[in-house]
Image (cartoon, rainbow, N blue to C red):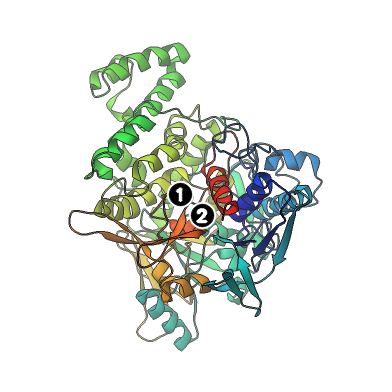
């Protein structure tokens, strides 16, 4: 018997691979444990607002193996989300059915539920799947195998193998968050801690209420959807772009983020299903060479190669935009022979103002002076419209969007270089977690362009104001409100009676609120992952596991031969685990699932 704890896309992938790899006449019983529906799990459950969108187009989302998957198990193809939409009627989301459309999350959840039903229906006769709509709270070894205890009192005993595919979990509040939550409780205010916005009850917020929001990433756009359209407002097209027609039930939002701007919109997809940039500098061989250096750092050894990839694509696309494909081909030959020579750019008609600048993209407000929040928002509207314009051109033809999409395309190569202590601990902490990951999210993991258009419409109608970069939140000494402002934009701090932390909590094993992870920590059956460093190892918040097939390692450093874990709880062992399964590019999730399932079947 095998127990899968967590039945979102990763757990579903292991289930499918168990069924595909099971051979012989012996009965295999697979227990699937999740309080949410199997397949969709918590994040993609069907019972959520239709306003919440994915940030990946439907043709680039799948749950099935294909010939690009490097695995030992059999390949069992199936339809992508877009392919499934073409053959399955759905009353909802009728306008989001194209291959390059961004479907709702609940529609993706419906697809995942269908995949689960298909996997179970197509399973060999010797496989039986038992679903438990409950939460696992304990896991222990016993004489007859492992025992999983559920919060409904059931005990699943005699498990030969247990796979933890827990996905994102809630975490305990930090010191500052606890202070803000306590302040809100004492004074009758509302504080919404870091969480998936779909899990929060925004109905408590009054119409017309002033609400502070920290964060301008994907969670922020979810908040916008839930408290604006979700309360009956409508976006309508006009000759000047989208306009918002309020229902009268909306609050007024005052938002800010460290960079002062929202995540950049995804460019219109011109790469089809599996198109991606092929690296010239940050290749697999280069990544392996980086790993051979025990003192490698991200900024010194990885970043220059990624930077070279981005600049090359940007300049090539810019030359192509102005002079055509032949001019771009000639430029590329010259540039690759002397990439550091500014003269190459000048010979091909590129000026100093054309040169790539991370600083200009990351802090585009820097050259400007703002007298107050209103002037900053006027500038921001121009910035948003410029970003929308770039996105409409596409992720191949537009130089900026083509360049930024390189970061997304090279996730695999970045992982090859830095996963499992590829760089020293202090570099991973300071340069990957605190610098590069937020930067890559800002540039390449942003929302559909529609969301940026909607943001601009809400600023114009007065229901949204961005306070500026480096937001500061204080509590009013009288207890009447929160105060939110910007460290860089002049003006009075704004008084709000609700505060929303618009971000998903980062995985942190020692501060996890997941009851099973808490139990494993308390009983010494798992430990945080440590990354070696000359000045002392860095203790990350990730769950320590062996190399693939990811056996769980206990507090004494001993791997459990029949217990496996993968996905978000192992963040820092592996980098950036928030992706969906994309067809045609050798999805790491599916390759991992195949290795885990084959190892579990031998237990």
Residue 109 image offset from top left, x and y in percent: 68, 54
- Horizontal arrangement in the rendering, residue 346 relative to residue 50 (left or right): left
* Quadrant occupied by the N terminus: bottom right
| Label disc, if present, on residue 336 of the rendered structure | none
| Label disc, if present, on residue 218 of the rendered structure | 2
Q: Is residue 590 above or below residue 600?
A: above
In primary-sequence order, the first of circles 2 and 1 is 2
Which quadrant of the figure has residue 62? top right
**Front-lying residue, 349 or 53:** 53
Q: How many marks?
A: 2
CB within 8 Å, label 2 to label 1: yes
Q: Is residue 334 above or below residue 243?
A: above
- Which residue is identified by label 1? 263
Residue 193: tell me if it is visible. no
| Secondary element at image label 2 | helix
**Front-lying residue, 208 or 220:** 220
**Front-lying residue, 59 or 91:** 59
Residue at the image position 39 percent from the left and 53 percent from the top:
573
Residue at the image position 62 percent from the left and 49 percent from the top:
13
Residue 187 image offset from top left, x and y in percent: 46, 87
* Quadrant occupied by the C terminus: bottom right
| Secondary element at image label 1 | loop
Cα–Cα span, label 2 and label 1: 8 Å
Disc 2 packing (10 Å; few <14; some 14–19; many ≥20): many
Q: Is residue 52 above or below residue 445?
A: below
Residue 179 image offset from top left, x and y in percent: 38, 80
Residue 204: tell me if it is visible. yes
Residue 296 image offset from top left, x and y in percent: 24, 43
- Horizontal arrangement in the rendering, residue 333 relative to residue 502 (left or right): left
């Amino acid at each position: 018997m095998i127990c899968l704890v967590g039945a979102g896309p990763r757990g579903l992938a292991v289930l499918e691979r168990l069924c595909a790899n099971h051979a012989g006449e012996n009965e295999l019983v697979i227990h699937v444990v999740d309080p949410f529906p199997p397949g969709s799990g918590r994040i993609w459950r069907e019972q959520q607002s239709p306003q919440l969108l994915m940030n990946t187009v439907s043709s680039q989302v799948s749950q099935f193996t294909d010939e690009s998957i490097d695995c030992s198990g059999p390949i069992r193809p199936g339809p992508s989300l877009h392919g499934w939409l073409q053959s399955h009627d759905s009353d909802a989301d009728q306008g989001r059915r194209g291959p390059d459309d961004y479907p709702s999350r609940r529609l993706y959840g419906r697809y995942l539920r269908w995949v689960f039903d298909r996997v179970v229906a197509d399973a060999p006769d010797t496989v039986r799947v038992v679903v438990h709509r409950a939460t696992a709270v304990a896991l222990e070894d016993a004489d007859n195998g492992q025992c999983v205890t559920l919060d409904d009192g059931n005990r699943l005993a005699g498990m030969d193998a247990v796979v933890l595919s827990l996905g994102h979990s809630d975490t305990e509040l930090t010191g500052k968050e606890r202070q803000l939550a306590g302040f809100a409780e004492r004074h009758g205010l509302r504080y919404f801690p870091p969480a998936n916005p779909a899990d929060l009850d925004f109905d408590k917020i009054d119409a017309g209420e002033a609400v502070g929001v920290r964060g301008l990433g994907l969670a922020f756009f979810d908040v916008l959807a839930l408290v604006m359209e979700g309360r009956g407002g409508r976006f309508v097209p006009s000759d000047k772009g989208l306009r918002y027609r309020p229902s009268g039930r909306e609050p007024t939002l005052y938002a800010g983020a460290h960079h002062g701007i929202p995540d950049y919109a995804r460019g219109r997809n011109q790469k089809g299903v599996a198109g991606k940039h092929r690296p010239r500098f940050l290749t697999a061989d280069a990544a392996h060479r980086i790993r051979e250096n025990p003192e490698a750092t991200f900024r010194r050894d990885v970043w220059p190669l990624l930077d070279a990839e981005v600049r090359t694509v940007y300049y090539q696309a810019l030359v192509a935009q102005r002079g055509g494909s032949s001019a771009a081909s000639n430029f590329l030959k010259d540039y690759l022979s002397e990439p550091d020579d500014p003269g190459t750019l000048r010979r091909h008609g590129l000026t100093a103002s054309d040169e790539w600048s991370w600083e200009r993209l990351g802090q585009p407000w820097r050259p400007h002076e703002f007298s107050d929040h209103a002037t900053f928002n006027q500038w921001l509207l121009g910035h948003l419209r410029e970003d929308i314009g770039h996105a409409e051109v596409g992720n191949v033809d537009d130089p900026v969007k083509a360049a930024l999409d390189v970061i997304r395309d090279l996730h695999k190569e970045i992982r090859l270089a830095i996963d499992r202590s590829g760089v020293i601990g202090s570099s991973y902490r300071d340069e990957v977690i605190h610098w590069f990951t937020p930067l890559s999210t800002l540039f390449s993991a942003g929302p559909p362009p529609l969301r940026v258009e909607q943001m601009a419409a809400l600023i114009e109608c007065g229901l949204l104001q961005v306070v500026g970069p480096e937001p500061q939140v204080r509590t009013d000494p009288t207890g009447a409100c929160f105060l939110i402002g910007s460290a860089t934009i002049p003006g009075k701090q704004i008084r709000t009676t609700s505060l929303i932390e618009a971000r998903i909590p980062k995985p942190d094993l020692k501060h996890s609120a997941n009851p099973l992870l808490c139990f494993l920590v308390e009983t010494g059956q798992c430990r945080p992952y440590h990354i070696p460093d000359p000045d002392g190892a860095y203790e990350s918040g990730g769950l320590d596991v062996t190399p693939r097939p990811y056996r769980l390692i206990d507090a004494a450093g001993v791997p459990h031969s029949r217990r496996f874990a993968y996905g978000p709880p192992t963040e820092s062992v592996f980098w950036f685990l928030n992706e969906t399964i994309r067809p045609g590019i050798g999805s790491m999730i599916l390759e991992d699932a195949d290795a885990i399932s084959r190892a579990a079947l031998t237990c």
